[in-house]
Amino acid sequence: MQKTQYWLVKSEPFKYSWEKFNQDGRTFWDGVRNYQARNNLKGMKEGDLVLFYHSNEGKNVVGIAKVVREFYQDPTTDDANWVVVDLSPVEALKNPVSLEQIKAEESLADISLVRQGRLSVMPLKAEEFDKILEMGS
């Protein structure tokens, strides 16, 4: 059995919020138009765990999702360069974890959320994922 990988995806709440994601129960993660983020989507495997981050407004990690379908052509474009994965919500964090809290946590200094602010899909190490969960519990 493959080892679980960990990721973080960003969504602006007014475009696609955690609440809407929970109502839908499943979604394809579209709109990625950055090659590095696209390559990260291609790296996602079924069963991987994903932190859901509200960007722009709020700037909080608000929940945990999981990958339920590996990458396929983005149905919103004919451009073969772009792919999506399907995600389902797992659970909300008891306490959203803010970007400020993450930046203040020494063990998270190297995560892409801090180092590459514009990247919308990024890998996390297991210990970074666990630390954020601990901060949100």
Image (tube, grey):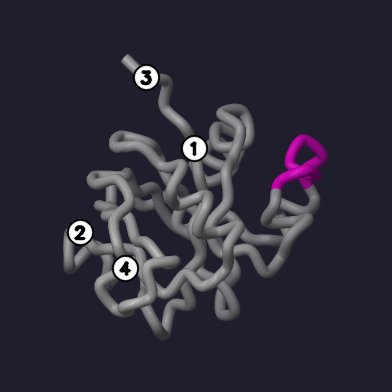
Q: Residue at x 71, y 65 (%)?
A: 117
Task: Say which residue label 1 marks.
Answer: 6
Q: Residue at x 41, y 53 (%)?
A: 63
- Nearest to the observer: residue 121 or residue 129: 121
Q: Is residue 106 magenta?
A: yes
* The residue stretch that appears in magenta: 105-111
Task: Say which residue label 2 marks.
Answer: 26
- Nearest to the observer: residue 87 or residue 84: 84
Q: Is residue 32 magenta?
A: no
Tell which circle, 2 or 3, labels the residue nearer the N-terminal end.
3
**Considering the numbered disc 4 on the image, is that residue within a helix, a strand or a loop?**
loop
Report whether 68 appears left or right of 52. Answer: left
* Count of number-bearing discs: 4
Which residue is situated farthest in the top direction here?
1
**Considering the numbered disc 1 on the image, is that residue within a helix, a strand or a loop?**
strand
Q: CA distance from mark 4 to mark 3?
A: 25 Å
- Location of residue 73 in the rendering, given as x and y in whole percent from the top left corner: 30, 63
